Amino acid sequence: MKKTGKLIKDHIKDSFPGYEIVTTVPSWLKGQRWVPDRLLFNESQNRFLAIDVILSGTIPRFQYNKIVEKLLSDHGNFRVVIITLEEGYEDNPGIARYCIETNMGFKIIIPGMGIQTIVRSDFDSSIEQNELPLEDGWFPKAILNQNKNLSRLCFNKTIYNFIGAVEKLGNDKEKTLKLVHSTIDELLSFHPAFKNSIKHFMKLEHFEKLFKLSDPDFSDHVFHSFRVFLSGCPVINDFYDHFLAAHKRCCIGPIEKLCVEYSWLLTAIFHDIGKPKEKKVVQKHVDNSFGQGEFLNVSFDMEIDDRMWASSQYIAAKRILGSFGAYVAQGYNGDNWDGGGLDDEESDKILDEWIKIYENLDSHAIISGFDFFADIAEKCKAASWRKNKTFVLTHAAPAALAIMLHDWKKWKELEKLKLIPVDGRVLPMAALLIYIDTWDNYKRKGDIDPLTYIRSYIVNTKGACVHVEWGNSSEMKDGTVGYELYQDKLENLAFALDIEYGLVEA
C-alpha cells in the first residue's frame, strides 16, 4: 500500500499541477455518505478534484448513482477520478464506459510501471499536440536503412528484396500485407543446414491457425511482428559472435548447423500469437459486439480443457520448455543444456507457474510460447521427428523461451523463478525482443496517422539506439512508462540497448 500511495502522490503532482490536499472539507461535501480517498483543491482555478482509489475495480454503484453523480451535476468545479489496479479493470471492463458517460476520469495502476490514464478528466493537465512527420507505409525508413548492409545473415538477400519492394508500395495496406506474408514464407522455408528436410513443413500456411492469416483485423499484429524482426536483424548481424556463443551452450546436435538469425526470426514472428486468447482481448471483443450499459453486462468464461495438456504436442512442449527454463534459470555458470532428456524439481516448479499463468489467460507471452512450440513440435514430428528434432530443440526452444519472457506484466512472477532479469550471456535474444517490443508503437492502432515517429535507429559497435518522437504529450506519458523499466530487467549485455524519446518539435 505504501508503494501504491507513492505512485498516486507522484502521479497527482505530474498530472494535476497546482492542486493541494484539502484541509477543510467544503460544506457541500460534509455529511455525505461517500468520502473519496483524497480531495484536492486548485485555488487559482477554484476547482475540487476527488481521487477515489478502488483497487478491486468494483464501483459501489448505489453511492455513485445516488451521491457522486448528483455532486458532479450540482458543482461544475468538481470532478472525480477513479483509480484501480490493472486486474481490477480487466475484471470490470465496463468502468471506462461508465466514467466516460458520467464525465469522470479513470486511471489504472500498472505494478512496477506507474499509473496509466484510460479516461482523461478535463481537469487533467493540458495536452500538448504537435504534428508528426508522416511516412508512407508501415516500416519506418530508419529501420529499413539499417537493414541494407546485413553481411552476416544467411537470408540477407530476401530482406534486401523486401526493402526494395515495400518502398514502392506506399500506403497500399493490402499489397504490403501480401508482401510481408510472402517474405515471411520465404524466410521460414530458408535454413542453410536444413533446407531439404524442413522446407516442406516450415511454410507460413502451416501456421495459419496460430498466425491468424485469414483474419483481416490481425494485419497490424503481422506488421508489428515483422518490424520487430527487421529491427533486430542489424543487432544480430553486428553482434553475431555474441549471439552464436550464447546459442552454442544450448545446441543439441552439430554446432556447424546453428543459425542464430533463424531463431530470431521465430522469436520475432511468433511473439504475439497468443494475444487473441488473452482474457482482456476476448472481453474487449465481447464488449464491442454486445456493448456495455446499465441493463446489459456481458462477460465470458473460458477454461483450458485438460485434454490440451494431455495431447502429445503439449506434453513435448512442457517437458522441453520446462527443462530449458530450468537451464536458463541456473545462470551463466551452469552446464550446457541437455535437451530436456530428464525432468527435475526446478523444471517442474517453473512449469507449474507457467501453466497457472496460461490457464488464467492473462499473459499472451506464456500463451504464445507454449502454443508456438507445441505447434512446431507437432509439425516436426509429422515430417519426421528423428530427422528434425535437433532443429526444434536448438532453434525453436530458445525462441519460445524468449517469447515467454517478454511480457512485463509477469516479470514479478518470473523473477521468483530466476528467469528475470534476463542474462544477456545466456539468452540475448530475449533481451533483444524485450527492447524492441518496448518501443515499437508505430501505427499499432492500424491508422495511417502513427502514434510515433522513428527519428533515428542506429546500430553500431556500441549497440543499438532508437530515438522515438511522439506527437501527443498525453499519449507519450502513457506510452513510455516502460522505457526505463526494461533496463532493470536486462543484465550482462555485451552491447547497449538504448531508447531516447521526446515530443516532436512544432
Image (tube, rainbow, N blue to C red):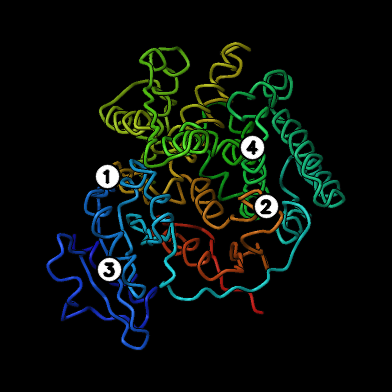
User: Relative to the observer, which residue lies in front, 24 or 427?
Assistant: 24
Residue at position x 65%, y 43% in the image: 220
Label 3 secondary element? strand
The numbered mark, 2 or 1, whose residue comes first in the sequence reads 1
Q: Where is residue 44 in the image (x, y as percent from the top left)?
A: 35, 88
Residue sitting at 38 percent across and 62 percent down? 105
User: Is residue 249 in sight in this rendering?
Assistant: no
Q: Distance between the Cα atoms at labels 3 and 4?
A: 39 Å
SS for callout 4:
helix
Say whether marks 1 and 3 touch (CB < 8 Å).
no
Which residue in the protein does label 2 denote? 447
Separation of disc 4 and disc 2 at Cα?
12 Å
- Quadrant of the rendered structure where residue 71 is? bottom left
User: Where is mark 3, residue-wise?
Assistant: 50
What quarter of the picture does the N terminus occupy?
bottom left
- Foreground label between 2 and 1: 2
Splitting the image into 4 quarters, where does residue 385 fall? top right
**CA neighbours of label 4 inside 10 A, class few (<14), some (14 to 19), many (20+):** few
Give the quadrant of the C terminus.
Answer: bottom right
* 279 sits to left or right of 184: left
Give me the C-alpha separation between circle 2 and circle 1: 39 Å
Instruction: Tell me: 438 left or right of 108.
Output: right
Say which mark, if any, is on residue 446: none
Q: Splitting the image into 4 quarters, where does residue 215 fall?
A: top right
Residue 64, percent across and down?
26, 54
Number of labelled discs? 4
